[in-house]
Structures are given as C-alpha cells and as structure tokens.
Amino acid sequence: MFRNRLNHRFWMLPYFLISLSLITACETTSSKSIADVKPDENILRVGVSTNAPPLIYKQGEKIVGLEAELAKEFAQYLGKSVRFIEVEWEDQIPALLDNRTDIIMSGMSVTKMRLIRISFSEPYYKTGQMALFRQRYQSRISPTYSGIKVLSIKLRIGVVKGTTGETFVLEHYGNAEKISPFDTSKEALDALLHNKIDILIDDAPIILLLASENDSKGLTTSTSLLNTEYLAWGIRRNDIELLNSADRFIDTYKREGKLNSIISRWIPFKE
C-alpha cells in the first residue's frame, strides 16, 4: 500500500508513534496460555505471535496492535468474548489444526503453501516486503527490488524465520553473500545496527515502525514495496460458519469505513 508515496512517509512518523502510545495506553486485554482456554461457543480463541509491531505485540503484559483491535471488534460482532492465545509463529497453523485456537489473527500473509493446509478469510490489508539499511550505504544500495537484486551477491541479508520475508529473499535474492535468519525483527535490527548484516527485509509495517523508532541511528528504507502480499485470517477448512462470518465482518467494516479507520490508526501511511 506504500508504493506511490513512500517518499512522503517520514514526516508522519512522529504522529505514528504518538498514536501507537495513545492506543496502547488504553488497551486492557490480557493474554492466556494455550492450555487455559478450551473450545467454547462463547469464546473466540485467537492465535497470536506477539513479536510483530504494529500488527500484534505486547505492551507490558497487554497484547496490542492492529490485529488485537480487529480481534476484539470481530469477537464483539460474533457476540463472543475474545481470548488471545500466545503461540510461537511456526506453531500457528498446527495449533489451529489441532483445535487449540479458533482463528489466526497475527499478520499472516496468504500464500499458496498455507492455502494447502488452511482457509483464509477475505484479505483485509494489502502490503508487501520492504528493506531497511544504513543511510551511509544508500549510495551503494539502490533501494528498489531491481537495485537490491543486482547487488545481492555482495549483500548480507537478514530475515525473520518462518515468514514470507524469508521465503521472498530465498526465492529472489538467493545468491546473496549471506542470508541470516533471526527469531524476531528486533534481533535482526540489532544485527543491522552492529554491522552484522547489510540489509533487513521484512513486512512493510514492521520495517517502517523499526525505522521510526530508530530514526536517530542512521537508518533508511527502500523507496517502494519489493512485492505485493495480502494479510488475512487463518481458519480451519471445516469451520465454514466462522469463515463466512469473518468474510461478512470484513465486507461490512470495509463498506462502512470502519476497517480503514482502524488500520489508519495503527499504520497511518497512504498509497
């Protein structure tokens, strides 16, 4: 969604951080462990991996972010209470298939491989991968898909394990000097700041937030998305009722302008 106006984005970053702090200060939802919540028709068990701000993360002991707010809205739409189930990213789909969660709302992109195992709601957000690197390398790294492609053989690229960013880098920049997988974007950022990698590729909202939080540390981002991805909610194939409800909820919130309003509070950047 940032393809055409990325060069205008950074003047909005202070407002981005202010809005995040205001929203998170009001969040009161607490998490539950996966063993605490059994299937219940009155509860929506939401699988989350809380390491992807601004999509889903923890503020102290509270789970916050775009997905957290949407989960609360969706549960209310269903007439249920919401329970966040913290799950490691690689266990999200197994937990869903084992009926340990009802739905994955954790910044998950729709991919062909994931569609083999689970169903997805209608996409609620268009995004893609973006690159983060040090400004002093801007003359060496052309911040576009093609520019990174040309130089990839000389680049040490950081990715987050098990994400579409890792898959994208392996498929498109597989000839890089080195591809380093990290458990979290924060760990990858630390490696970038300490010159252990040359560039970090991750979801655009995450990259933009990392850039804004480290604005004084000489970082910059690619000028466009490196690809196009769609975020949606993962649901078991046999849970047709929940899938249809999710699609109706997204369609209703889109038509009424509520979805864009919620997204804009967490990711205030326009196409």
Image: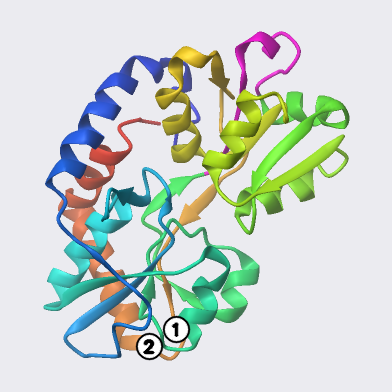
Residue closest to the eye, 127 or 108:
108
Q: Quadrant of residue 240?
A: bottom left
Whether residue 268 sits left or right of residue 2 in the image: it is left
For the point 40% across and 17% down, which residue is it? 10
Element under disc 2: loop
Give the image location of residue 83, x and y in percent: 24, 73
| Marks 1 and 2 close (CB-CB < 8 Å) | yes
In the image, residue 76 sits, relative to residue 196, either above or below, namely below
User: Which residue is identified by label 1?
Assistant: 236
User: What numbered label is drawn on residue 174?
Assistant: none
For the point 55% across and 13% down, which residue is it? 218
In the image, residue 107 sits, relative to residue 119, either above or below, namely above
Q: Amino acid at mark 1?
A: Arg
Give the Cα distance between marks 1 and 2. Answer: 5 Å
Q: Quadrant of the N terminus?
A: top left
Give the image location of residue 99, x and y in percent: 42, 88
User: Which residue is identified by label 2?
Assistant: 239
For the point 23% across and 90% down, which residue is it? 40
Magenta stretch encompasses residue 136? yes
Q: Quadrant of the C terminus?
A: top left
Q: Which residues are magenta?
A: 128-143
